[in-house]
Amino acid sequence: MQPLDAGDPQTVGAYRILGRLGAGGMGRVYLGRSAGGRTVAVKVAHPHYALDDEFRARFRREVAAARRVGGDWTAPVLDADPDATVPWVATGYVAGPTLTEAVADAGPLPAYAVRALGAGLAEALTAVHGLGLVHRDVKPSNVMLTLDGPRLIDFGIARATDGTASLTSTGVSIGSPGYMSPEQILSKDVTGAADVFSLGAVLAYAALGEAPFPGDSSAALLYKVVHEEPRLDGLDALDGELREVVAACLAKDAADRPSPGEVARRLAPGGAARLVAAGWLPGPLVERAGRAAVRLLDLEPASAPPGLSGPVPFSSPAVGAFGPPPASFGSGAAGPGSGPVPAPVVPEPRGDAAATATDPAGRLSLSLTTENTPGDRGRGRRRSCTVVLAVAGALAVATVGGSVYLSGLGGDNTDAGKESGAHDAASATPPGVPKAFTGTWEGSVTAGGVASQYSVKISAGLPGDAVARTTNTFGPLRCNGLGELDSATANRLRITDRADPARPSTPGCARGTVQITYTLEKDGTLTVRAEGAGTGNPAGSLRRLDR
């Protein structure tokens, strides 16, 4: 838990704030306490969302849906105010490590613990699906381990399956690489079977200590989920029946997966509660969960430093979902091997139009975040969005800014145009974008044989100005970028492309930047190319639509 700073509230609704647990794309998460002494997790939306009527409507529906979720294996929604100046929601606080932390700290869980874990989560999903809801983001960091059983948390991106309430929209991530079902990745209809697939991946992770679809990039993870079989080596020796359940959950076809109720019955015929009551956690995790619970008794409200108090803008506009708790969630401080603790997003005082914020370390997920960081000449500069997708029959690709590439784009900003330097040397060097470039251009770009539709609107401007608005479309994905002019000649522009905060991209965006070169050819077409380590050397030819 982190101490409060000048931008944090002392109270939210009827809850005293004890400290800050972390921050996500949609807001900050605080540890609070009610007048009656109950400890809660309070999620406060970013203030700029308060001005967005669509967000308020979605938030109101999310809260209404989450209030319906109850049972022994979830964290209940206790209170909320969607109509407050800054919307907030309070859920029951779960004292204990996440499954991610537990595995990192103590290694894979023993078979009996995995059985109890699977049975509890399956019973939770049975209750959720019975309400017509789908969780959509079951993953290790959304599973908490407590002395009295597992808890499934973070229903912020659940959606009603009866069509009466869509709790997701453009710019809100809907899953995590390696744990998303194939139908989620391919943008097909999502039902409760998607949660069962994610449950199977979570159980494999708990039993083996590693994800069943390993990979060093989100593109590789998504591709493997769609096209490759899971790695379940070692489950046979641990528990043959457990392997059969996990393998069934990870079936590519949603119709071939068991229901959550069937999973619960196979893992715990007498119910999850019986397994938990017999003692379900190994010794080291019992000790850690116990310390987390005891530590809550000693917590007193933290004092914020002198200055402003209350919700103020945390950062520039961000789009995403409340993420999982940080490594310190429920344990006061991250222990050895608990994983990195996300850095806090520190707000600036009110009224400072030029305020900037640091960019927190990102987790591997499909959420999009854009934040201001100081750039040259003192102006804020945008972090970019990277869209990653794997689709059936296609190579895994990653989309950065407004362009599609084979993998994450590195920082290789070498001169991509030296092969035609003689032509440039003979050209005059105007101070900004030549008129011949201005207008809208469209075409396709290709990297490693994978093509996507690309358009860019180029406007006049000087170095340092935002002069290019890009849109790149690949299958169901649409990624919007904003390009800042680095340099210009009569026939060439060099652009740094980042996310366009005014045009949220399709869910699945993360951070990244790329250097793009636009070259005006003698036939009137515009060549676009990005070069650098790991880019796949994407290139294409664009034609002018208008000026």
Image (cartoon, rainbow, N blue to C red):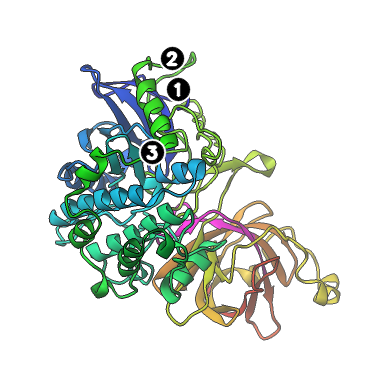
Residue for point 23% across, 47% down: 62
Q: What separation in Å lies between label 1 and label 2 (alpha carbons)?
A: 7 Å
Q: In this view, does 114 lie to the left or right of 120?
A: right
* Residues under numbered marks 1 and 2 in contact, where contact means CB atoms less than 8 Å apart: yes
Q: Mark 2 points at which residue?
A: 303
Q: How crowded is mark 2: few (under 14 residues within 10 Å), some or many (20 or more)?
A: some
Closer to viewer: mark 3 or mark 2: 2
Does 222 appear above or below 261?
A: below
- Residue 200 percent across, percent down from the top left: 34, 61
Residue for point 69% across, 43% down: 376
Q: Is residue 126 left or right of residue 420?
A: left
Location of the C terminus (image quadrant): bottom right
Does 34 appear above or below 422?
A: above
Q: What separation in Å lies between label 3 and label 1 (alpha carbons)?
A: 15 Å
Query: Which SS class for mark 1?
Result: loop
Query: Which SS class for mark 2?
Result: loop
Q: In this view, does 261 lie to the left or right of 240?
A: left
- Residue 149 percent across, percent down from the top left: 28, 40
Residue for point 26% across, 33% down: 92
Q: Between residue 65 and residue 298, name the one nearer to us.
A: 298
The disc placed on residue 4 is 1
Residue for point 83% across, 73% down: 421
Q: What separation in Å lies between label 3 and label 2 (alpha carbons)?
A: 21 Å
Q: Name the residue under label 3.
A: 27
Q: How crowded is mark 1: few (under 14 residues within 10 Å), some or many (20 or more)?
A: many
Q: Give the range drawn in magenta.
A: 496-517
Q: Between residue 126 and residue 413, name the one nearer to us.
A: 126
* Residue 511 magenta: yes
- Residue 526 percent across, percent down from the top left: 63, 77
Specify whether residue 330 is in view.
Answer: no
Q: Which of marks 1 and 2 is nearer the N terminus?
A: 1
Q: Looking at the picture, which amino acid does disc 1 mark?
A: Leu
